[in-house]
Amino acid sequence: MPSQVPKPGSVRLRSRRGLQRTATDLKEIARRAQVSAATVSRAINGIPTVDRRLARRVWKVVDELGYYPDQQARALVSGRSRIFGLIVPELTNPIFSEIVQAFEHIAARNDYEVLLRSTIHDPKDMQLALRRMMERRVDGVAVLTFGMEESLTPTFASHSVPIVVVDARHETPGIANIRVNYQNGIRQAVQHLAALRHSRIALVAGPPNLKSAQSQQLAFEQSMNELRLEIPPEFIVGGDHTIEGGMKALTILSALPARPTAILCSNDMTAIGVLRQASDHGISIPQQLSVVGFDDIPFARFTTPPLTTVQISRLELATLAFEALLEDERSDPSMVFNREYVLATQLTLRSTTMLTPPRAAGH
């Protein structure tokens, strides 16, 4: 026999011992809270038309009795699971663990749960993650991988749930975009290095398949061109956002006949690798080489010396993503076009940059 969608007056509750409660319990909650059973049902299901004072009275009694809503029944009644999916590329990089923590904290404050998945930028893993989230009937998905693969856009768009991505602007309905303002932070970094008389500035770029890495490189090239600073082709080295990638890049750059006097890195993990390898090569930071990172992870303050870096706010990113999902959830996804949010960047000065010696600047 097919299951019936429960009526508002018969929403199931469970005790903290896992025992299922019945409509009788709703009546008891209603009696103690001095409201109607229908008001109890609407308050439990998060219906926004319920008076806040009445809702607080209901939840106070629910807590006193040790009950909590049966989430499956609640979802059937309200049509919402109150679960948001969150996809990140990895958790080993501190920036992503901070993003996850911030997103989960905001979700908890808003009575949402988070279904988390990491994908290591693998399109197959991302497709699988999305499918699992659709099976859980999530109310929206935040894809915070800093450059979603283009091939996945039709897959995401085929589902009628809100999606928010980072650095993947397109015309697909129902998908909002958070654009990181790389230009501002990277321009500040390049201008800072130029003010310190650096003209030979190298870039350790991110993975070329990521739009974020492409945007960073474009911002670097534009900022250098604005100052009429030359960029030898060998001064742009591909990286992979890892410490090992930064170590490898420094080895390549230090072997050049005319070495750079400053290096801008695609992220802080790469910059930490550059600092580590510079020590092995006998290169003094910042006396012989200035280094700038990107992200401003907590470790950046504790490197030797502390890392100058371009900061992006993980809390602001998580907040923008969550608010975008809430806004799109209240709208018809098919009618949402070109919704874009901008995430600011800002140079944070520490101790890995300094005035280059006149002899080095003149080479």
Image: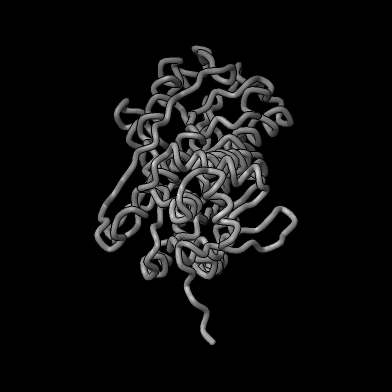
Name the image quarter holding the N terminus.
bottom right
Residue 239 point in image, percent of width and height: 56, 46
As drawn, 96 above or below 315: below
**Along the line of sight, the residue nearer the viewer: 319 or 341:** 319
Q: What residue appears at the point 51 percent right and 18 percent down from the top-left corner?
A: 349
Q: What residue appears at the point 44 percent right and 45 percent down from the top-left corner?
A: 322
**Along the line of sight, the residue nearer the viewer: 341 or 312:** 341
> Which of the colour schemes (rainbow, by chain, secondary structure, one colour) is used?
one colour
**Along the line of sight, the residue nearer the viewer: 198 or 335:** 335
As drawn, 260 above or below 243: above
- Count the numbered circles shown: 0
Residue 77 point in image, percent of width and height: 46, 64
Q: What residue appears at the point 55 percent right and 58 percent down from the top-left corner?
A: 121
Whether residue 95 appears in this view of the structure is no
Residue 280 point in image, percent of width and height: 74, 31
**Along the line of sight, the residue nearer the viewer: 354 or 161:** 161
Whether residue 196 appears in this view of the structure is yes
As drawn, 90 above or below 192: below
Based on the displayed image, in which of its 4 quarters is residue 333 positioned?
bottom left
As drawn, 22 above or below 278: below
Based on the displayed image, in which of its 4 quarters is residue 148 positioned?
bottom left
Q: What residue appears at the point 63 percent right and 23 percent down from the top-left corner?
A: 301
Residue at the limit of the structure toward the bottom, as seen here: 1
Residue 358 point in image, percent of width and height: 49, 12
